[in-house]
Amino acid sequence: MSRLAATFEALSKTGRKALIPFITAGDPRPGFTLPMMHAMVEAGVDIIELGVPFSDPMVDGPVIQRASERALEHKMSLRRTLAIAAEFRKTNQHTPVVLMGYVNPIEAMGYEDFANAAQRAEIDGVLTVDLPPEEAEECVALLKARDIDPIFLLAPNSSDERIKKMDTAGSGYIYYVSLKGVTGAGHLNTADVEAKLNRIRANTRLPVAIGFGVKDAQTAKTVAGLGDGVVIGSALISKIEANLDEPERAKNEIVELLVAMRQAMDN
Amino acid sequence: MTEKYNMPDERGHFGPYGGMFVGETLIPPIQELNAAYQQYLNDPEFIAELDADLKYYVGRPSPLYHAERWSRELGGAQIYLKREDLNHTGAHKINNTIGQALLAKRMGKTRIIAETGAGQHGVATATVAARLGLECVVYMGAVDVARQSLNVYRMKLLGAKVVAVESGSKTLKDALNEALRDWVTNVDNTFYIIGTVAGPHPYPAMVRDFQAIIGREARQQCLDQAGRLPDALVACVGGGSNAIGLFYPFIDDRSVKMIGVEAAGDGIETGRHSAPLCAGRPGVLHGNRTYLMEDDDGEIIETHSISAGLDYPGVGPEHAWLKDTGRAEYVNITDNEALEGFHSLTRMEGIIPALESSHAMAYTMKLAPTMSKDDIIIVCLSGRGDKDMQTMAQREGIEL
């Protein structure tokens, strides 16, 4: 069983939901990421989404865009992100790590070389935001052959047909983008999310993690009541951005927020 | 290749290029757009409305002008200019915005967004939005806003909101990113008019089809005026919409050479250029696979060209395919060479070309003397140079 499947199975046995933080590798500088990952595990997260910085992050809002720019200033790259993940795995064997990014850095490395490198780094899932299933056949086959879960997005305007497509192409979990827009935008409409989740559940048995618009412990709790996992990204990165000269303080504030979310979600 | 050219396939692929590389939220609107486009492409009523607009509003057909003096001076092939500079708003861009805006109206969209580099596409979009009474927002890199302030003012006069994009390199690619973000957020009422043959399927094919009027007219005009097909076509390539518009109707005419001219900026060897077909490699950006300017890690690198309209790190996927199959050839021209082309055409023919088009002129100056006096070159004069007066004056140390 994959590390992701095992994680969701263990959670569902205790009736808990997955807390999934997203941070951009190398933001605000490369040395910050690895200790931050371990600290997030201690704060009670279940899965880590590690963002691979890209020069043209079309789907991301300004907060994650700036995180990418800061990371790229320090020459962060797909290769170096994989190296951080491999380092993390040396001392943590149980927390799944999902790479999240855009397809071009993977194209530049070559699909097969990337799949091999991800396997060596013991990456558990790969979420490529601009690689829909129609274009992903080659990449998906290479990942699945190495027991790496290809993770796909669903949006509020995705049809039942597309949900079925993600169910076939994807594994690990489905990432439900809870609002039309970029990362970090707007506010969640709980009733809308709930209605859509019913459509998704009717068409896939994969766990559903919900992201885009989760800002605090309260929204995390609400969202946890609807899906199998909660993804939080921009709200964490905002802490980094607010404390660029004091990374230690950023780390503490992130841990504090995650602990609060964990408690709110579990109670 | 004896079969008739028939690209792209139904999923928008030109061989390995093109496709639909977008986030999930954009899949439904793109499918909706594609369905509408396929429907109206063959709808006689839509075609009739488009043709009437092109004739009475844009001023088509644009002339094919035999530049006799310039041809004589260069001492080789006869040069014919396809005068897209004479269109309403001064460039080829309006051929496409007219078509997409009519489509937006048919689809019931009330809001139009666009990206722009030099501002020509932004102006052409603001123009059709004004005419149809649609809300219009144009995204433009902050660097381009500064160097094309005249076009910014034109767009504002036309009622468009111009958003200066401060992210990344603050040029055309970043304007495209920002327009895509807007579209993701406002998919329900918004139509995104992409200005070039890039973006996800169906944009590369759709923009090509709207721009192909350039080549259809030029082909017929050449037959009428010179009694035969040309020997070579020359057009500048940024995203490549004027070039594909000229080339496409000639693709099955195997005797006609097609030459796309990229911007070499300070020179290919300096790395400061915008020539992905000449010096880049395949990758994925803005919804399609094509040749890109990128580093070893797949990060897009900054481009440079004196002309804002060519300052883009990618190129339409069909050009990538035409390059790989050898059907078209891609060359490059530096900033300084483009300026020579600019001055030469201006002084010889009394026509001031846009800096983008000046790249095609500069290459023609190299090509024509190598050909015989009986040979024919058609060059796409994609836009007029009025918008570049500030840039030119500044470059030559003149205060306006």
Image (tube, coloured by chain):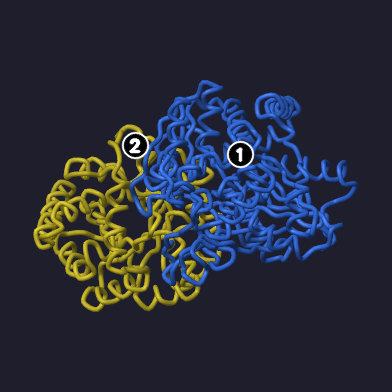
Q: Please name whichever residue, B42 or A153, is drawn nearer the observer in this view of the structure.
A: B42
Q: Chain of mark 1?
A: B
- The residue type indicated by label 2 comes to Glu
Amino acid type at mark 1: Ala
* Local SS, label 2: helix
Chain B painted colour: blue
The percent coordinates of residue A200 (x first, y second) are 42, 44
The answer to whether one can see residue A184 in this image is: yes
Question: Which quadrant is home to the N terminus of chain B?
Answer: bottom right
- As drawn, the label of residue A194 is 2
Q: Secondary structure at mark 1?
A: loop
Where's residue A67, x and y in %?
27, 56
- At a point 31% along the width and 66% down the height, the residue shown is A97
Residue A46, quarter of picture: bottom left
Q: Which residue is mark 1?
A: B91
Quadrant location of the C terminus of chain B in the rendered image:
top left
Image location of residue A32, percent across then percent down: 19, 67
> x, y percentage for residue B235?
66, 53
Chain A, colour shown? yellow
**Left or right of residue B354: residue B6:** right
Q: Chain of mark 2?
A: A
Disc 1 versus disc 2: nearer the observer: 1
Q: Name the residue nearer the viewer: A227 or A255.
A: A255
Residue neighbourhood size for the residue with mark 2, other residues' Cα within 10 Å, grouped as few (<14), some (14–19), many (≥20): some
